[in-house]
């Protein structure tokens, strides 16, 4: 079955709920979309969300990379999907969101051609897992209101953004734990906002409240992470420090700076490289979290299928489509009481609106 038509474009997607992290406030996001159409009319769709602050990729760079899709994919047989996916590593180097959109679209097309959900083609390891939902950096009273809303909607894991003001971070975490009790799990994400001294203090003050911390120090400070106590390192997740499979060897050097890897398709370039990281993590005994940017249901579904096919997956942070004011597809996953599972539809299980 050959690909006979390729389309790509960008969409401006507003957020219903702007939020603040350690280095910026976000109220809208640009996503790019790729569609492959096979000769029998079956289509596969992919999406990407460039993260300039993390990977250096701009939307302009993404679209430029996608200009090369036709010579790479038009007329190619999708039965050679593994070869085609491997070729992206060199042809789209430096544009991981564009590569992810292409990778996801091809996976979706293959799944639809075979008539199976992607997770079952990849080898299902989990039926469903709970996802966290993110609360940005905001005053304590607003934090309470947002947390109450999410808990009322059935979520049991709150991910609190931190990293701007240490004292306020500690207060917000302690007050949320005091109010909601141990049944609600709390994770934090400093987005590289702490110094070693700040993180030590934060950890000591909140260690009985916080499940784990994401990327407390700047991405280049692996030696500083390695100097921390093992209890802190085991409960820290690599995010900005882990972009592609090539970053994994440094993160496995003893003493290991992180006990958890956060895989994002927009950092690594799609499902295939994400699963490469996942296999390395599994062999090394590292727990996995699968995260996201502000993304369409399309790429969130791709991350979910990959996550549920990875034995090392322990955590999900796949809330990136929940605050979009609009999307171009529906379906993709089922969310019930904070738990995510795939649909029984083939491929990603998404339907263009």
Image (tube, grey):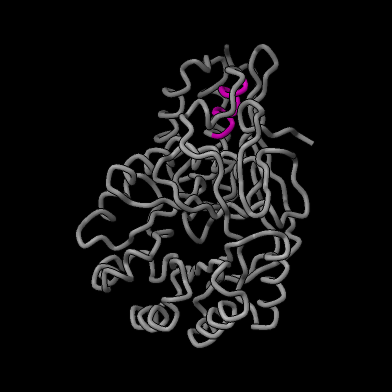
**Principal secondary structure, stretch drawn in magenta:** helix
* Residue in the image at 53% along x and 57% along y: 52
Question: Is 176 on the left-hand or right-hand side of 281?
Answer: right
Considering every residue shown, the one lying at the far bottom of the view is 167
* Residue in the image at 26% along x and 73% along y: 229
Res 111 → quadrant: top right
In percent of width and height, residue 146 lies at 70, 71
Q: Which stretch is magenta? A: 104-112
In percent of width and height, residue 128 lies at 56, 43
Does the magenta-highlighted stretch encompass residue 190?
Answer: no
The N terminus lies in quadrant: top right
Does the magenta-highlighted stretch encompass residue 109?
Answer: yes
Res 220 → quadrant: bottom left
Question: Is 257 on the left-hand or right-hand side of 274?
Answer: left
Question: Is 118 on the left-hand or right-hand side of 228?
Answer: right
Task: From this view, report whether residue 197 is shown above or below residue 111.
Answer: below
Front residue of 265/178: it is 178
Question: Is 169 on the left-hand or right-hand side of 136?
Answer: left
* Residue in the image at 68% along x and 49% along y: 336
* Residue 317 visible in the current orientation: yes
The C terminus lies in quadrant: top right
In percent of width and height, residue 308 lies at 50, 40
Considering every residue shown, the one lying at the far left of the view is 254
* Residue 99 visible in the current orientation: no
* Residue in the image at 70% along x and 79% along y: 142
């Amino acid at each position: 079955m050959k690909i006979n038509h390729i389309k790509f474009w960008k969409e401006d997607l507003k957020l219903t709920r702007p939020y603040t992290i350690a280095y910026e406030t976000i109220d809208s996001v640009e996503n790019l979309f790729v569609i492959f159409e096979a000769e029998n009319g079956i289509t596969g769709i992919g999406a990407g969300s460039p993260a300039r602050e993390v990977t250096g990729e701009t939307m302009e760079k993404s679209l430029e990379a996608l200009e090369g899709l036709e010579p790479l994919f038009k007329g190619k047989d999708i039965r050679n999907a593994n070869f085609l996916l491997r070729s992206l590593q060199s042809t789209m180097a430096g544009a991981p969101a564009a590569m992810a959109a292409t990778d996801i679209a091809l996976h979706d097309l293959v799944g639809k051609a075979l008539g199976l959900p992607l997770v079952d083609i990849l080898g299902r390891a989990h039926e469903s897992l709970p996802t966290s939902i993110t609360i940005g950096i905001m005053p304590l009273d607003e934090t309470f209101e947002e947390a109450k809303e999410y808990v009322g909607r059935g979520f049991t894991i709150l991910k609190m953004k931190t990293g701007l003001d240490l004292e306020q971070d500690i207060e917000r975490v302690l007050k949320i734990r005091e109010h909601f009790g141990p049944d609600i799990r709390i994770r934090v994400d400093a987005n590289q906002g702490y110094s070693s001294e700040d993180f030590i203090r934060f950890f000591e003050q909140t260690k009985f409240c916080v499940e784990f911390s994401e990327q407390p120090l700047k991405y280049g400070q692996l030696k500083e992470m390695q100097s921390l106590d093992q209890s802190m390192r085991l409960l820290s997740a690599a995010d900005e420090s882990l972009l592609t499979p090539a970053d994994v060897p440094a993160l496995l050097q003893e003493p290991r700076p992180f006990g958890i890897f956060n895989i994002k398709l927009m950092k690594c370039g799609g499902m295939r490289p994400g699963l490469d990281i996942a296999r390395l993590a599994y062999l090394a005994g590292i727990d996995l979290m699968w995260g996201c940017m502000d993304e369409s249901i399309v790429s969130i579904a791709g991350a979910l299928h990959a996550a549920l096919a990875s034995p090392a997956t322990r955590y999900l942070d796949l809330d990136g489509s929940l605050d979009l004011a609009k999307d171009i597809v529906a379906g993709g996953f089922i969310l019930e009481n904070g738990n995510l599972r795939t649909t029984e539809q083939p491929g990603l299980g998404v339907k263009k609106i």
